Image (spheres, rainbow, N blue to C red):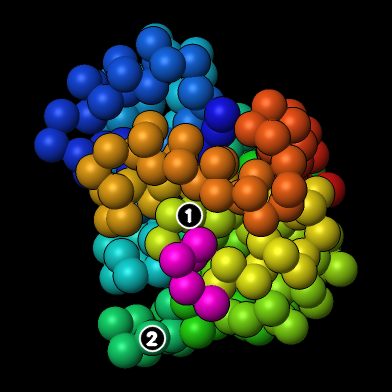
Amino acid sequence: MIDAHCHIDLYDDPIALAQKIHHSRMSCVAVTMLPSHFRMGETHLSPFDNIHSALGIHPLRVSEGQNEVDDFLQISQSCEFIGEVGLDFSDEGKSTKELQIEVFSTIVKGFSRGKFVSIHSRMAHYDVARILGEEGVQSACFHYFTGGVVAAKELAKQGHFFSVNQRMLRGRNQDLVRELPRDRILVESDGPFLSKAPLSAIKDTYTQIGKIWGMDLSDTESLIAKNFASCRTR
């Protein structure tokens, strides 16, 4: 199984969680909020070969992140996993909208071919898609997408993917799993924001997606593993 978006560094005991993930053999993309967080976490997570440290500048941390853009671009040259990055035009983020656009438009230049990119796009998916398109970036993963099925289908046509979490499957966003091409779906815990127990959350999400698709767990795991391998920028 694969957790495509988890904030391991925000748990009370990140190393204990990393050890549990390692022993479970579940793969995990450990997203970060800032390049400085990535640097701190990478040293601690490097012994765990199934945990992938991801380089991020979260849109809601952009006031701090603007001072780390050069560091982001430098690290991105050798970092395969990028996240969490993107835009947030909700009430939380609207005061920094212009700065977010400026920073995201700059760091997208670091999303070179062959990278896994986890995207935040709350109330901003059109602008995210526009900026990605301007740089020719395809096959990014929209994490916890809430923009609706019509917008999701258009993004899927552009080559993008979607990571689905437990909460999405309880509401109208489960329609994404029903209506999008199956080869565009990944799974995430978005822990600790959505789950204090990411391993069990991931297992439950896989099970629920399998039921929606009418597939057994083994086939669901195989398809999502193939999707994850394909979800690389090009």
The residue under the point 23% across, 43% down is 196
Answer above or below: position of 23 versus 172. Answer: above
User: Which secondary structure, mark 1?
Assistant: loop
> Is disc 2 surrounded by few (<14), some (14 to 19) or many (20+) residues within 10 Å?
some
Answer above or below: position of 38 versus 66. Answer: above
The residue under the point 46% across, 42% down is 204
The residue tagged 1 is: 165
Q: Is residue 169 magenta?
A: yes
The residue under the point 31% across, 55% down is 194
Answer above or below: position of 125 versus 156. Answer: below
Quarter occupied by residue 2: top right
User: Which secondary structure, mark 2?
Assistant: loop
Asked whether residue 6 is in view, the answer is: no
Residue at the limit of the structure toward the right, as seen here: 157
92 displayed left or right of 148:
left
Residue span colored magenta: 168-172
The residue tagged 2 is: 90
Q: Nearer the viewer, residue 124 or 108?
A: 124
- Looking at the rendering, in which quadrant would you find the N terminus? top right
Q: Position of residue 142 (x, y in %)?
A: 60, 61
